[in-house]
Structure formats: structure tokens, C-alpha cells
Image (cartoon, grey):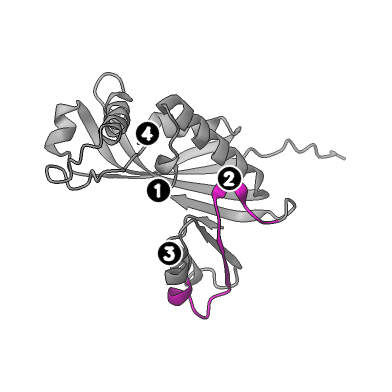
Amino acid sequence: MDLGCGDGTLIKSSNSVIADFQFLGTDVSHEMIKMAQDNLRGINVDFIVCDGFYLPIKNEIRFDFIHSAYVLHHLIGPTKGKSLKLVAKLLRILRQRLSDNGILIIQEVYYDSYIIPSVTSGLLFYMLKLFNFLKLDISALIKEFQLGLEVNFMHTSEIKNLLEQLEGTVRMVGKDRWVIPLLGRMLLLRDQGSVTFTFELRNKLRIEKVE
């Protein structure tokens, strides 16, 4: 399952390696699902327009591979703490959908600050809340910050800790660093980019009879 499949890029590249898989692509956007359908013709894939918190599939269905890219920072509550609780809740849902030997792969944007890792991400979270409350459009100054945008960027340790709460084996398998803009330096940003973690269920203890 690719949660937040977008235009289906991951499924298309995965199919070239493991063509005998059955894929499920989900997204909250009808437009993205339509684009994925057009891009993935001839591939064994089903699509569902849905919210990850309410997957309309039977409880007994499990997946060998679940992927989610750049979805978690869009889970927004009234505070950063409540936003992190939403992230933790979605991760628990995905963990419950894993098969016994399944793997969960999470790709996310990260923002790590000097001294206290969460400073920059927290400042961005509440700055955007304030701008939207005051209806201040700063897109002319910073084009990425459109009016109405709210994001909950996390730092690498924060993402790792949330995955570790699922009681499995967590590994960081990739990290791409981006150029730090002037605003980031003003907000004490040390490092930013994209990070990829894998989560696997802990192996169950096997007791073998010795003859």
C-alpha cells in the first residue's frame, strides 16, 4: 500500500522490480488518484480515495509493504503536541496493517535546529498559525508560504522516536540534505532535508526443540 500515492511514481518504479505484487494506492485527492490511474495503466493496482485514518478496507487485510511519503507533516492539530499525537495515531494504524514480515517505509521532511532540535519546526508551526489567524499573506516575500498553509515539520529524532513507540526495529536508511535558506538561518536551523526510515516488526522468539 502506498499511502498518499500522488501520481503513482513509487508504484510504477516498484512494479519494474517486483511485477508480481498487487498494489493499492490511496490519496485524499481525487485529482491525484486520476493522475495515478493514467500513469499506471497495465499494472496490477487498485486505487482508493480516502483518509489514512479511515481506510475503507477489511480489518483482516494486511500488507507486506506500506509506504508513506511526505504525509505526516500535513497532520495538523491546534498545537504542535496535538499534531504529533495525530502522527502517532496514524503510524499505529499503519503498523496494525502490516503482515508478520511486513515493512513500513516513512519518508518525511525534517528540520533540525541548533541546541534544541525542535526550535525551528516549532517556530514555523506557530508562525503559520499566526499568519493564517491574522490573514497575513506573505507569499510575495516567501513564495512557499501561501495563505492557508499549515505544516508540522519534525526533526529526525522526533520521527525516529514516534516510530520506536510502535515496538519494532527502526532504521534510518536515507538522508538528503537541502540548502538552508536565509529564513532558516534566522530561525537557528542547522540542517534540513528529506529522511527515510524503515520499521519492521520485532522477530518473535522462536524456541526450537534440540534432539
User: Dot 4: what SS?
Assistant: loop
Mark 4 / mark 1, whichever is N-terminal: 1
Where residue 36 sits in the image (x, y, percent)? 45, 69
Residue where numbered disc 2 is placed: 53
Up/down of 64 relative to 106, above or below:
below
Q: Amino acid at mark 4?
A: Met
Q: Residue at x 72, y 55 (%)?
A: 58
Q: Which mark is residue 154?
A: 4
Answer left or right for 91 relative to 101: left
- The residue nearer to you, when weighing 64 against 133, is 133
Q: Which mark is residue 109?
A: none
Label 2 to label 3: alpha-carbon separation: 18 Å
Q: Amino acid at mark 2?
A: Phe
Is residue 99 among the parts visible in the rendering? yes
User: Dot 3: what SS?
Assistant: helix
User: Does the magenta portion include 40?
Assistant: yes
Q: Residue at x 55, y 53 (%)?
A: 66
Q: Residue at x 48, y 28 (%)?
A: 82
Q: Amino acid at mark 1?
A: Tyr
Label 3 to label 4: alpha-carbon separation: 25 Å
Residue where numbered disc 3 is placed: 32
Front: mark 2 or 1: 2
Q: Which residues are magenta?
A: 37-57
Where residue 35 sits in the image (x, y, percent)? 42, 70
Q: For the N terminus, which image quadrant?
A: bottom right
Q: Amino acid at mark 3?
A: Met
Residue where numbered disc 1 is placed: 70
Mark 1 / mark 3, whichever is N-terminal: 3
Label 4 to label 2: alpha-carbon separation: 20 Å
